[in-house]
Structure formats: C-alpha cells, structure tokens
Amino acid sequence: MSADLPIALVLIVGALPILALRGSARGAYLVVLSAVAFVYLLTLPHGVFGRFTLLGEQLVLMRVDRLSLLFGYVFLIATLLNVLYAWHLEDRVQHLAGLVYAGSTLGAVFAGDLLTLFVFWELTAVSSVLLIWSRRTQRAYRAGMRYVTIQLLSGMLLLAGTLLYAADGGSLQFGRIGLDHPGGALILAAIGIKCSFPLLHNWLQDAYPEATETGTVMLSAFTTKLGIYALARCFPGTELLIWIGVTMTAFPIFYAVIENDLRRVLAYSMTNQLGFMVVGVGLGTEMALNGAVAHAFADILFKGLLFMSMGAVLLRTGTVKGSELGGLYKSMPWTTGFCIVGAASISAFPLFSGFVTKSMIMTAAAQQGHTLSWLVLLFASAGVFHHAGIKIPYFAFFAHDSGIRCREAPPNMLIAMGLAAALCVGIGTVPGVLYSVLPYAVDYVPYTATHVIDQLQLLVFSALAFAVLMRTGIYPPEMKSVNLDFDWTYRKLAPSLLCGIAAAWSRAGQAIGQCLRSPLEAAAGAIVGLHRPEGGMARTLSTGVTAFWAAVLLGAFLALAFF
Amino acid sequence: MQKERRYWLDRKENVTTVYRTVWGIGALLLLAELFLHRHEDFTFAAWFAFYAVFGFAACVTLVLTAKVLRRILKRPEDYYER
C-alpha cells in the first residue's frame, strides 16, 4: 500500500467540517477523524513516500520508519484524548486550531527533509498560539505574543541552520546532523527552544499556564515532544546533550517547589522530564534512545493527564492556585483519583508508566559510567515525586479544606482522564506492548526485585521527607507570588534597559545641543551683525572711496599683466 | 441547613495514622532490602538503605534550598503587570 497521502493533511483538511458542525455531531466527527487517522497510520508500510521536487530539491512528505511511527501513534492518541476532553467546548477556534496543531506536528514527524520540517515547524507555532489567545484575556494575549515570537525565532534558526548546512555540502535530509557542520549549532538551538533547554526554557512556563483549560492539555502533548523527536533524529549521541539534559532535570524542581500556580508547577515539571529524554538522546546508545522516546511516549500521557486534572479544577473552581485550593477530593473524587494515577506515573511508581520508561535512561547512564549525571538524575527523580507526585494532588485536593464546594468535572473530561489513566497503568503493567514498537530491540527487564525495592525506597522516603517537613512547619507555604526566572531578562531587564538607553540618548542629545549652542549662537550673531541693515556689509560707501578701490583693483591687474 | 458529611481524613488522628503507616512501609522496605541479591552498576548504590537515605536527604535539601531561593526570587503577583 502506498503512503503518499500526508497524514498531516488528513487532520488539517479533515478539520474544515468543524466550521459547520456543533455539539455532539462535532464531537463524534472528531473522534471518527482521529480514529481514521490512527487506522491509516497502522496500515502504513515503512519507506519514503510523497516525494516531489521544488526548486531542484527533492522533498519528502512521508518518511515512515519505527521512530516516526512511534511518535505518530502517541500524537494521535493524544489528539483523541484531547478531542474527548474538549468535547463540551463550544469554541470553533480552539477545535480548529487544535486539529491544525496536531496535524502539523504529525507533518513535522513524518517530514523526510528539513524544508518540509520547517514548514510544519512554523505551522505548529502559529496554530498553537491560538490556544493561548483563546483565553481572551490581556494577560493571555501578551503571553501568547511572547510565546509565538520565541517559536517563530526557533523556526528562523531552523531555516538559517538548514541553509548553512545545505550550502556546506550537507543534504536537506532530516537525519543525523551533528555539531561538526556549520549550521548544526543553529539547528540545535532551534530544536533546543522546542525542548526547553536551560535559558531557552521560559516560554513554556510563561505561556502554557495562560492557555485555556483544554488548550494547555493540547499544548503539553505536542511542541516539546516534537523537539525531542527532532533531537533524536539529528543529534543522537551528542555528549553535550547529557549535560544540558542533566541541568534541565535539576533546576526546574526548585522552582516547582515554590511556585503557586499548579499548572506552572507542571510546566516546570515538563522541563524536568524533558531533561531525562535529552540525556537519553545524548547518551545515544540503543537502550538510551529507546528510553528517551519511550519516556516521551509515557510523558505525553501522564503529563496530559495531570494537566487534564488541573484543567478540570480550573473549569470548576476558576483557579489553580495552591494558595486558594485544598480539600477538593470531597467535590471531585474522580478527578482526584485520576490525578493521583498521573502523579504516580510521573513519579515512576512500579506498575505505572514512568517506572518502565525512565529507568531505561537511568540504566543506560549507569552502564556508561556517568556517575555524576546518574546522581543528579536520581536527585531529580526524588524531586519530581516531591513536586509533581505529591505537591500537585496534595495542594489541590487535600491539604487544608479551602471550603470550595464544586461539581465534579464534566463526563467527557472524566472519560478522557480515565482513558489516559488506563493507558498509564497499562504501559506500567504490560510494558512489552510499548517496548515492541520502540525503534530498537529491547533488551531490558524493568521488573526486578532490586529495581522495585530501590525505587520504592526512594519514593517512600521522599514522601516521608515531605510529610516530616509539612508536620514540622518547615515546608514553604503556598503564597500568592511570582518567582523571577530567565523571562525576567526579556520582560523586565531588556525593556528597562531600552527605556534607559532611549532616555540617555535623549539626554545626551540635549547636552550636546547645550555645548554647541553658545559657539553656534556666537557665529550666527556675527553673521547677522555683518549682514543686518545697519551691519558692515550693508553700509553705503561714498563714490570717491568706491572709485579709489576700483582704481586700486585695476592697477593690481595691470601690475599682474607685466609678470 | 444540612450538616456537611464528615470525611475520614477530616479527623486529625486518621491523618496521623496515614503518616505512621507510611513510616511502617518504609521500615518494611528497609527490611526487604536485607533479602536482596543486588546487581548495581555503582558500588555505592549497593550500600544498605542508599536509596532511602538519598531520597530523604534529596527532598530535604531540595525544600530548604528552594526556601532560600524564594527569598531572592519572590515578587508580588502583579509584578509583571505594573
């Protein structure tokens, strides 16, 4: 069977009838569309399809192999979950933007060349920002502007890197690039923005918590994992990535502990989890790469589930601030349960998805003797349980009773959360299914007595640390506040520097004007003095004096004529 | 007005029971370690209670450091809107 029809078009063109459909008809149509796309994916043969030539370059719309298929599967599962989660929503913009966003991400995943990748890369940026702007607040508008600016910058870096790379004799193929070629560093920076590398990370924590309840869930699935996919394609085994990834796992957890907005806590937790994947790509062995992409697969589901539970809380209570929530398990028991499943999965509890995916990366790091990296990853594993595994469910659903009594999440949200939770448990209990679709053959057994006991000790004693700190009052309370992060440089420092420079420029202009004024005024005064009606140049001379000077002049000419 | 249902976790002594149970589970896990035949990639990871001590110490360090960081980084909620 041929695979010339780009999967991206199935979703993007297939999204158009949304404009005419409403309510359940639209919901049912979207479910069928996602299912049809998934079935199409299952029938795809491996190989390169959808070739065409543009300006003498051969471009490939569909490169089907184990890696692209794995991400294709999980992105379509995420699309289906999002369609169910947003079933109740009567906002065509969000439905349309969501499908175009999902479609363009799939387009990027199956792209066989860097130019096709670039086109879909940009389309994901432009479509996804609508999910932020759909919140329809000034705050969301500004966050969306910052978000889309940074995403488009990533696209520009990708294009510039591609052109440099191609000009240096590299091909346009979307494959292993490395840092030796010129252009490689630019492409890495472009991908690094999507993966939220340190100092390039802040768009994520800035923008995701500002999107709509459903929009944030959608956003959490696609952009960053597309970054991981591109990283695994272009830079496997790049040692620099180990250190970048290790940094990513460690620093966000400190922020997550003191952050009040629980969706922002999850955004910090995203960078932390992406760090594990980046380390896996950096290690570059078959087990590490398997671990990186398997963890991306699991992360899309458990992070989506956690964002879904917080979206439901936001929908029902109007806030996701830890300082204002608490005791919601009484009103939203199902949401509480699903959130706990997501929390257990991200924390890598045995029988939950994170346990069977993250451990492959940890084991690969240990086998290669990366002692320091492994210790930081272990620290980050304890930390992620602390801030995402305990903090999120604890402050939203337990802690002190905030007195908020609300309705349980709508049925469609509960179904989406239930399915995501089932998948998290399914992957954790029957890892073989996921392992069978990974890019390389898996030679790893997650369930050994040592691994289970070690992991449980780590998690239970992390939980005890939390409990002890809470009971002794040492744990920092949730406070209404924001914490300065790198976005401070472009939200405060740069604007105030520019204002400062503008003010200094204007003051310098005035000072220079002052200095020049007096000599200029003196010169102008002298000229005016000479030429004014009673000035030297304007005075009338007597005929005799004039005749005398005319004679002197003529005499001078006569004298000159003799020489 | 109808009196609201009282939940099991509303009682302080039940929260303490949960807390003690978790300590009990921790103790059982340490006990279980005695029966393990370890194959660790790092020698130090095979030390008794390494993961338990590491997990506890890591989280305490994390929270105490974050508390210090908060002093430096915390700003009012409307800091960027001013």
Image: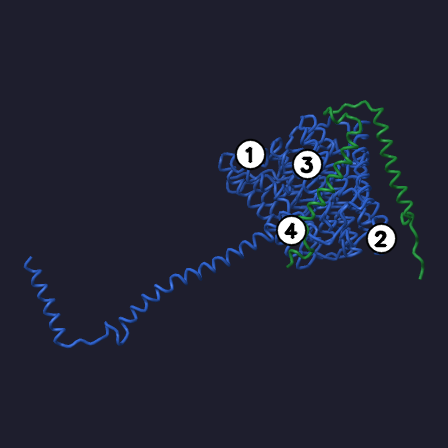
Chain colours: A blue, B green
Query: Badge 1 sits on which subunit?
Result: A
Residue where numbered disc 4 is placed: A127
Q: Is residue A349 visible?
A: yes
Residue where numbered disc 2 is placed: A401
On screen, residue B27 above or below A543: above
| Of B44 and A227, the residue lying toward us | B44
Q: Position of residue A310 (x, y in %)?
A: 77, 50
Which secondary structure, mark 2? Answer: loop
Which numbered disc, 1 or 3, marks the residue that appears first in the sequence?
A: 1
Residue where numbered disc 3 is placed: A277
Mark nearest the camera among 3 and 2 is 2
Which numbered disc, 2 or 1, marks the residue that appears first in the sequence?
A: 1
Query: Badge 4 sits on which subunit?
Result: A
Q: Position of residue A26 (x, y in %)?
A: 75, 54
Residue where numbered disc 1 is placed: A179
User: Which residue is at a point 85% across and 48% down the rendered structure image?
Assistant: A334
